[in-house]
Amino acid sequence: MELSRNLPLTRSVLRTAIRDATPGQLGFLADLLAAENASRAESKRLRLTRTAGFPQSKNLEGYDWSMASFPADWGREQLAGLEFAANAEDLVLYGDVGTGKTHLAIAIGMLACQRMIPVRFFTASSLVMRLRKAKDAGGLDRELATIGRAELIIIDELGYLPIDIDGARLLFQIIADSYERRSIVFTSNLEFSRWGDVFGDGDMAAAVIDRIVHHGRIVRFHGESYRNTHSLMK
């Protein structure tokens, strides 16, 4: 154990060991390396999940799909396959409050982490606050680069809280920088025609929507709030 501490394998040494090994020793080495690879992969999954910043743990198992309506040529199989993330396509989860948009967004993000895809999760207001703080401290470029290392960005609750024009410009930087480079999943209860209210600028909203529509899809949600349906306050 002491000899193995902080000791990455050297391929030339390993090659010599393999050449001189007996069949039994080769089997032992193969089992050891397979276990090491599995351990490193699981450690990476855990690290990616922690770094993503999910507010809670969610998955697709048992998810109620009844309130979600998919495009005609795209559905649950494609969503779970994460092809959209591999192709740097966007996804908008739009609809009524409490119908499972955030749950689905988190579940997608956690599934991506399990498949070794770096993810970052933010509410729209917390992302703007984070960017504003970085800008005030003179570290905006560094913060944008840090966020940009993710291959999938989730922006939750777009439109739930007002954003001033400076905050909207910061948010636009993330969206514009991600175009055709990484995927963004948005959740919102606002239709596109009202996104101008979010960004405080019709032209900026139009530019955002143009990018999303070009390489994106909308999953629509309808129904009564799950929280209201299962509320203790009747």
Image (tube, rainbow, N blue to C red):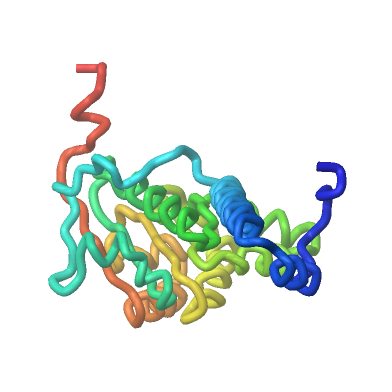
Quadrant, the N terminus: top right
Residue at x 23% of width, y 29% of height? 228
From this viewpoint, which residue is outermost toward the top? Answer: 233
Specify whether residue 175 is in view.
yes
Q: Quadrant of residue 233?
A: top left
Question: Residue 39 in the image: x percent, y percent?
Answer: 60, 49
16 relative position to 204: left or right: right
Residue at x 62% of width, y 53% of height? 28
Question: Residue 42 in the image: x percent, y percent?
Answer: 56, 49
Q: Is residue 163 above or below residue 140?
A: above
Residue at x 28% of width, y 57% of height? 94
Q: Is residue 234 above or below residue 150?
A: above
Callout count: 0
149 relative position to 197: left or right: right
Q: In this view, does 74 lie above or below 167?
A: below
Quadrant, the C terminus: top left
Specify whether residue 202 is in view.
no
207 relative position to 178: left or right: left
Question: Residue 216 in the image: x percent, y percent?
Answer: 33, 74
Q: Nearer the viewer, residue 25 or 79?
A: 25
From this viewpoint, which residue is outermost toward the right? Answer: 3
Q: Quadrant of residue 13?
A: bottom right
Question: Residue 89 in the image: x percent, y percent?
Answer: 39, 74
Residue at x 13% of width, y 71% of height? 72
